[in-house]
Each structure stands twice: as C-alpha cells, then as structure tokens.
Amino acid sequence: MRDLLSKFFAFHGASLATADFQFIDFWQEADSFATEIFTSLNLDSKKVASSFYNRYQRAKLATRFYQDSGPCDSGFTNPSYEPVDVVSFDDRAAMSTNLKNFADMLGDWIESYACLESHERVAGKQIRVPERSVKDIRKMSRKTEYQERIKHFVKKNFSFYRFFLFDS
C-alpha cells in the first residue's frame, strides 16, 4: 500500500511526509485490529459486534483533529506528538485483553495527535465523542464474559485434545 501511495504522489508531483505514512499505517492497522475484534464478537452476538463497530467509527472521528507537529492552541487537547505503539489482535489472548489493547492504542493516538484549535463549547463536544467511544471500548474489556474466553475453550475442548495428544 505504501509503495502504491508513493508512486501516486510521485506521479502527481506531491510528496508525503513520514508522519503522513505513520498516520496511514496506524489507521490501516487499527482497521485490521477492529475487523478481527468485530469478527470475533460477531460469533457470539451480532448486537455486541455492531455496538463495537459503532464505537470504533465514533473513535475514528478524532482523525478530523489530526496534527503531527507544531503548537496546538486548544483548551481541550494538548497533543504530545509521540509515536504510538501499534498492537495487533492476538487470537490466543482473551477478548478482554484485545479490547483493552485496542482502546489503549486509540487513546494513545488521540493524546498524541488530536489538536482541537478552538475554545468554543461546541468544538469541545466534538473531541469528547471519540474520547467517550474509546472509554466505552475500555468498559467492554472489563465485562466478565470476555475475561476467560480462552480458558473456556480449553476446558470445553480438552478431552478432544487429550485424546489426540496422548492416545495416538
């Protein structure tokens, strides 16, 4: 994808800064991570999966406030411009761990790059929507039904694996 974008911008006489590549890479990874979570949640409950999807879409509204450097004259945000560690979905981990890692990654991005240059009350509400959505995803990670998914799978399937491993 990066090569394709480089060729496109080179052809059109434009350039893309390193920060822009980081921005694109981050959101591609975030979309991939969200897709894995959505797919996994969808196996259990379509309602929960669509709720997660809607929260993620609201969290992505923070991209409107993206700024990769310079002063941020804001009463609502104070970006640090520090690189964000990108985490991938871990299919061996419990869903709660994946949800928490995902929410932390989104929260770190908002803290690092979201700059709302306005002091109006309405503008303050705009940045609160993505922040609240990330907070809601964090709340999902604390639900008990997502805490022990891996242990339930192992317990449920242990007799099959024990037969397969020890009786052959």
Image (spheres, rainbow, N blue to C red):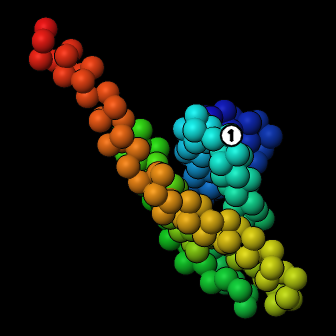
Tell me: 144 left or right of 48.
Answer: left
Residue wearing tag 1: 46
In the image, residue 167 sits, relative to residue 43, either above or below, namely above
Q: Nearer the viewer, residue 102 or 153?
A: 153
Query: In this rendering, does residue 132 appear at all?
Result: yes
In the image, residue 153 sits, relative to residue 118, either above or below, namely above
Residue 95 image point, x, y percent? 46, 48
Q: Nearer the viewer, residue 98 or 20?
A: 98
Residue 64 location, quadrant: bottom right
- Residue at image point 41% right, 54% down: 147
Identify the image quadrant of the C terminus: top left
Residue 130 image point, x, y percent? 71, 67
Tell me: 50 left or right of 118.
Answer: left
Identify the image quadrant of the N terminus: top right
Q: What amino acid does circle 1 point to?
A: Lys
- Residue at image point 60% right, 46% down: 34
- Residue at image point 65% right, 79% down: 70
